Amino acid sequence: MADDVLRIVVVDDVPDVAESLADFLRLDGHNVCTAYDGQEALQVIEACHADFVMLDLGMPGMSGRELARQLRERHGNELVLVAFTGDADVDVAFSSQVAYVDHCLRKPLQVDDLAKILPRPLSAGARKRVTGIAGRSPGPDGGPPDSGWADTMSQ
């Protein structure tokens, strides 16, 4: 495996969200596994030998915060943990809900936000394929189009 290929696990209780994000990350050449709840994630993270975990904070059952706490307890700082949330009440910079994670992003996720946290730049090819899906229109500020999966990521 190339040094710049990550083993990523995406955890979200909405399968379409998890699979859309996983597909995007695969386009960039990463090895990606998915899980749809915290308990399943614990098993998948071990089986996939993950080094990077992206998790939804607002999952039923075991929350993303609890999953992150357990992962820190088991793995210390060996895993990079990235939380994402659609909850406008969560301060992604200072909330106790994000105390165990390395990064927290707000839904809908944006390509540029992911590019800032992944250890290498997202490839131009992956950006082009994702932003070109279904003729997406320019972003709200008139800038580049949103990602091809931002619509599903806002759930």
Image (cartoon, rainbow, N blue to C red):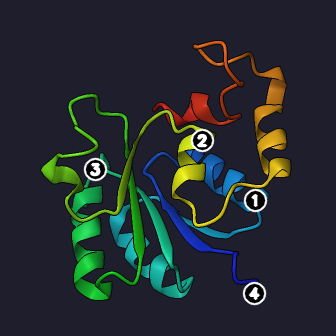
Q: How dense is the environment of label 4, judged by Cα within 10 Å: few (below 14), some, or many (20 and up)? A: few
Left or right: where 113 falls relative to 82:
right
Query: CB under 8 Å between callouts 3 and 2?
Result: no
Q: Quadrant of the C terminus?
A: top left
Q: Name the residue under label 3.
A: 60
Relative vertical location of residue 2 with respect to residue 33 in this rendering, above or below: below
Q: Give the secondary structure at mark 1.
A: loop
* Extreme residue in the left direction: 96
Location of residue 154 in the rendering, given as x and y in whole percent from the top left corner: 48, 31
Spatial separation of the CA atoms under disc 1 and disc 3: 30 Å
Query: CB under 8 Å between callouts 3 and 4?
Result: no
What amino acid is found at the position of numbered circle 1 in the picture? Asp
Q: Which of marks 3 and 4 is in front?
A: 4
Q: Mark 4 points at which residue?
A: 1
Q: Name the residue under label 1.
A: 28
Q: Name the residue under label 2.
A: 112
Q: Nearer the viewer, mark 2 or mark 4?
A: 2
Location of residue 79 in the rendering, given as x and y in whole percent from the top left corner: 41, 78
In the rendered image, which quarter is residue 86 located in?
top left
Q: How dense is the environment of label 3, judged by Cα within 10 Å: few (below 14), some, or many (20 and up)? A: few
What amino acid is found at the position of numbered circle 2 in the picture? Asp
Spatial separation of the CA atoms under disc 3 and disc 4: 35 Å
Spatial separation of the CA atoms under disc 4 and disc 1: 14 Å
Left or right: where 85 falls relative to 62:
right
Q: Which residue is drawn at 54% across and 51% down?
A: 116
What amino acid is found at the position of numbered circle 3 in the picture? Pro
Query: CB under 8 Å between callouts 2 and 1?
Result: no
Q: Nearer the viewer, mark 3 or mark 2?
A: 2
Q: Which label's residue is closer to the chain start, 2 or 1?
A: 1
Spatial separation of the CA atoms under disc 2 and disc 4: 25 Å
